[in-house]
């Protein structure tokens, strides 16, 4: 029984049918009874009327319920169809593939959301439309062509095609179109299913391209590749392998590794055992082999004609799932040229080493990091210490001496690939890795050049030195003399001009430029000088100057009026002297003194005093230079004598040169001392008297020693005074010179000059005493007067002590006193102590 499953509508319909049947039964029985008992026709008619009405009413009710029943069933069927339709839509819309259906005329009757995405339209815009509405004509024609072909053959068709989505991206689709059949098997349309194979297509293209590149690589690579089967037969080889092994591709395939066509050999050219062949090594060990160098000895078809190809071999095995070797891949890199080049390089290296050792020049080789890796024997001779002191220790980039000398710039140029000629320079190997401090100053002429490989890449640099110390010392000496001469001229207190018979002015000193106002470039010829300075007197003066080149001794030219650049007239007192022949031309030195302000007594006296001081200085220079010049002359004569006797050797020349160099250094220091003496003081400076006196002593000590005068000095002062250092030094020199002259004129034995420096409350006191003749008390008050002298007119000017007093009292606000007892004379100079601020 399924009564429990009936709904209310069905129950009501069954009840209505039940009562309808009861009503019929009742009518039937009641109709039979009425006909049996009733004789009244009217009642019978009424009964028949009720009966008919009942039939109609009952039938209507039944029909009504029947209609309601069928409507209910139809509604349930429609709901079921709608539910199934929604399920169908959800299913096809959830599928990523493009799904669609068309009728026989090509109009779309169904599609999924993937098709909407592909067309860029909604389903309502698609259904009922053809391809010509949705796509461009060319695309629609293509679709229609495939549709007609499928309908004609009445079987499924598939094809791949590239399509473009509305957003612009492309996809590679596999489309399958099939007949759409009704329940009788008749075709009433087509159904299509398109799957996206873009990734697979792209992967396929990558694989194809990769395989092609790999194939091209194997074919074109400069590396021989051979694939062996486990039995060592060759199953594949590329063209390079054919070239290396000496056979064409077809001839190689199928050959065994033991084929006598080629033999593998070691570096010493002894044959490899068959078990040591590369493929057999891989087969026996099942492990890769790496960078094994072997020789391949191949026969060229002519008896006894053999050639060797050297190769760098690598290899590995491929395995199957059972760990069994399926094939062995061996690669051969042809390194024959490299081996031959290495052999050739070895020969060249031996030649290079031989040349290095035989070369008289120093040769040093450095690696890319600047480390010294090789030197020749000349290196040890140059520096006079073993090469082991620096080899593999000395680094160009870490050397302070290299940095100080300025060589890094040239070294970097060489590492950049240039060959560099370094200007002559001095080098002293004093660092820890530069000869362990064994310094030896040398003048060097150096060439730095790179060593490059076949690719023009710098591998090392070579530094080649030539020792030019001796030549440079001579040149330096000459240059030093020239500089000293120029310095003396330039710093001289009087105007000086050098000129030659070609009418060229070679030099004018600073005082000359300052006095006249003309720079050297404005008066660099006698023509320019006389025209600017003498005006109308130019012809006369120029004629006089032309006569000067005939001089053989110094002359006083007298006084000349000079027109300065500022159009002022000054009076110069000129003198000239011959300098001999310079650069093939007779040359004259002319000096002048401006006496324009002669009437200005003090200034005139200062000029005369400085001239006198200059004379004293020249005398001192003469004393200090006499011995060094004699030594220089002696060693020079020795060198000339050795040369003339053909007994000249580098060791002796070096000794001579060192001695000469030492003496010229002493001469240079002397020039510096006296040049400083003549530098004018422009401002007051805080100084210590001990510093001034020490500098004074350095200038006068030689002349005192040469004359047998003992110099004593003591200083108990560390105070400062305000002074013009050069002027104060002039005072001390004047007094010491006066003491020296007094001692010499009286031929004093055990002659002594003693200086003491000490402080009192206000002054720094300097006492200068000598044991000469002493000063007569009658003339003692006059010694500071101008032009007063006890030396005679030929030996003294009488200005030294006058100027000393003027400097101490007027310029330095100090005091100067003199006392003389017996043979002892003492000068006392008192200068105010400079108070701390």
Image (cartoon, helix red, strand yellow):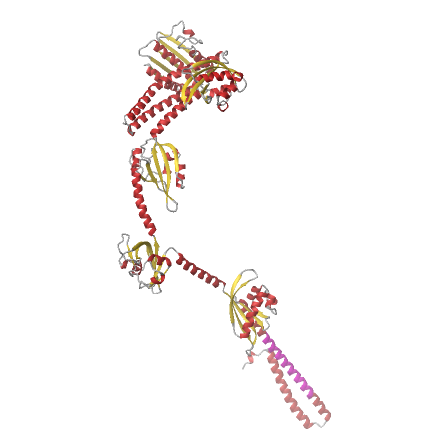
Q: Is residue 176 magenta?
A: no
Instruction: List x then y, in percent, for residue 375.
Output: 31, 38
* Residue 516 appears in the rendering: yes
Left or right of 32 on screen, residue 115:
left
Q: Residue furthest top?
A: 778
Residue 393 in the image: above or below residue 107:
above
Query: Who is closer to the viewer here, 597 or 746?
Result: 597
Left or right of 417 on screen, residue 390:
left
Residue 289 in the image: above or below residue 438:
below
Left or right of 552 on screen, residue 188:
right
Instruction: List x then y, in percent, for residue 222.
Output: 38, 55
* Residue 407 appears in the rendering: no
**Quarter of the rendering occupied by the N terminus:** bottom right
Quarter holding residue 217: bottom left
Instruction: List x then y, in percent, for residue 314.
Output: 34, 56
Magenta part, dominant SS: helix
Residues drawn in magenta:
51-78
């Amino acid at each position: 029984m399924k009564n429990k499953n009936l709904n209310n509508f069905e129950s009501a319909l069954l009840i209505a049918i039940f009562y309808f049947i009861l009503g019929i039964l009742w009518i039937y029985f009641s109709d039979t009874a009425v006909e049996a008992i009733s004789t009244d026709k009217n009642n019978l008619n009424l009964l028949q009327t009720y009966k008919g009405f009942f039939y109609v009413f009952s039938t209507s009710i039944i029909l009504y319920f029947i209609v309601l029943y069928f409507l209910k069933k139809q509604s349930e069927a429609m709901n079921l169809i709608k539910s199934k339709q929604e399920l169908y839509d959800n299913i096809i819309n959830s599928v990523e593939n493009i799904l669609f259906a068309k009728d026989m005329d090509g109009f779309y009757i169904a599609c999924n959301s993937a098709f909407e995405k592909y067309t860029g339209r909604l389903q309502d815009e698609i259904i009922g439309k053809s391809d010509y509405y949705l796509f461009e004509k060319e695309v629609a024609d293509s679709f229609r062509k495939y549709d007609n072909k499928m309908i004609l053959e009445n079987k499924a068709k598939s094809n791949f095609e590239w399509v473009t989505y509305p957003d612009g991206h492309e996809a590679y689709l596999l489309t399958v179109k099939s007949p759409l059949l009704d329940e009788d098997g008749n075709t009433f349309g087509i159904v299509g299913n398109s799957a996206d194979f873009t990734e697979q297509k792209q992967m396929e293209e990558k694989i194809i391209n990769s395989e092609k590149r790999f194939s091209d690589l194997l074919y074109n690579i400069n590396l021989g590749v051979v694939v062996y089967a486990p039995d060592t037969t060759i199953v594949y080889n590329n063209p390079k392998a054919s070239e290396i092994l000496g056979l064409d591709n077809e001839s190689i395939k199928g050959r065994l590794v033991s084929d006598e066509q080629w033999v593998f050999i070691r570096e010493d050219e002894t044959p490899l055992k068959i078990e040591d062949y590369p493929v057999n090594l891989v087969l026996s060990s099942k492990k890769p082999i790496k960078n094994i160098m072997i020789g391949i000895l191949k026969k060229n078809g002519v008896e006894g004609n053999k050639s060797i190809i050297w190769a760098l071999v690598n290899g590995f095995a491929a395995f199957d799932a059972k760990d069994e070797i399926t094939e062995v891949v061996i690669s051969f890199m042809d390194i024959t040229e490299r081996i031959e080049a290495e052999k050739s390089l070895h020969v060249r290296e031996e030649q290079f080493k031989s040349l290095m050792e035989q070369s008289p020049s120093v040769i040093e080789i450095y690696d890319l990091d600047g480390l010294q890796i090789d030197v020749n024997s000349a290196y040890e001779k140059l520096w006079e210490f073993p090469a082991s002191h620096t080899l593999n220790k000395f680094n160009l980039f870490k050397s302070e001496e290299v940095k100080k000398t300025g060589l890094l710039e040239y070294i970097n140029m060489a590492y950049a690939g240039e060959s560099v000629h370094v200007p002559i320079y001095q080098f002293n190997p004093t660092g820890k890795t530069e000869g362990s401090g064994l310094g030896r100053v040398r003048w060097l002429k150096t060439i730095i050049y790179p060593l490059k490989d076949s690719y023009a890449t710098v591998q090392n640099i070579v530094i080649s030195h030539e020792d030019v110390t001796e030549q440079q010392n001579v040149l330096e000496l000459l240059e030093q003399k020239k500089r000293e001469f120029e310095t003396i001229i330039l710093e001289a207190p009087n105007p000086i001009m050098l000129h030659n018979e070609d009418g060229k002015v070679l030099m004018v000193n600073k005082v000359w430029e300052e006095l006249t106002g003309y720079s050297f470039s404005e008066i660099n010829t006698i023509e320019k000088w006389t025209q600017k300075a003498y005006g109308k007197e130019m012809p006369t003066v120029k004629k006089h100057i032309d006569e000067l080149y005939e001089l053989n001794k110094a002359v006083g030219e007298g006084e000349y009026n000079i027109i300065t650049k500022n159009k002022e007239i000054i009076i110069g007192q000129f003198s000239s002297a011959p300098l001999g022949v310079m650069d093939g031309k007779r040359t004259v030195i002319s000096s002048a003194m401006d006496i324009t302000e002669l009437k200005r007594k003090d200034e005139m006296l200062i000029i005369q005093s400085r001239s006198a001081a200059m004379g004293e200085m020249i005398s001192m220079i003469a004393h200090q230079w006499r011995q060094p010049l004699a030594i220089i002359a002696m060693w020079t004569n020795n060198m000339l004598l050795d040369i003339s006797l053909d007994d000249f050797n580098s060791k002796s020349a070096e000794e001579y040169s060192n001695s000469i160099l030492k003496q010229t250094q002493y001469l240079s220091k002397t020039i510096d001392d006296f040049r400083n003496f003549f530098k004018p003081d422009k401002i007051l400076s805080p100084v210590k008297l001990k510093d001034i006196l020490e500098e004074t002593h350095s200038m006068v000590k030689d002349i005192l020693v040469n004359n047998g005068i003992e110099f004593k000095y003591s200083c108990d002062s560390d105070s400062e005074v305000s002074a013009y250092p050069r002027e104060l030094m002039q005072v001390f020199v004047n007094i010491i010179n006066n003491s020296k002259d007094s001692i010499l004129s009286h031929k004093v034995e055990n002659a002594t000059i003693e200086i003491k420096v000490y402080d009192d409350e206000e002054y720094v006191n300097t006492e200068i005493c000598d044991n000469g003749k002493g000063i007569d008390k009658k003339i003692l008050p006059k010694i500071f007067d101008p032009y007063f002298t006890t030396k005679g007119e030929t030996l003294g000017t009488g200005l030294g002590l006058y100027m000393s007093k003027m400097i101490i009292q007027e310029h330095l606000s100090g005091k100067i006193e003199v006392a003389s007892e017996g043979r002892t004379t003492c000068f006392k100079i008192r200068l105010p102590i400079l108070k701390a601020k």
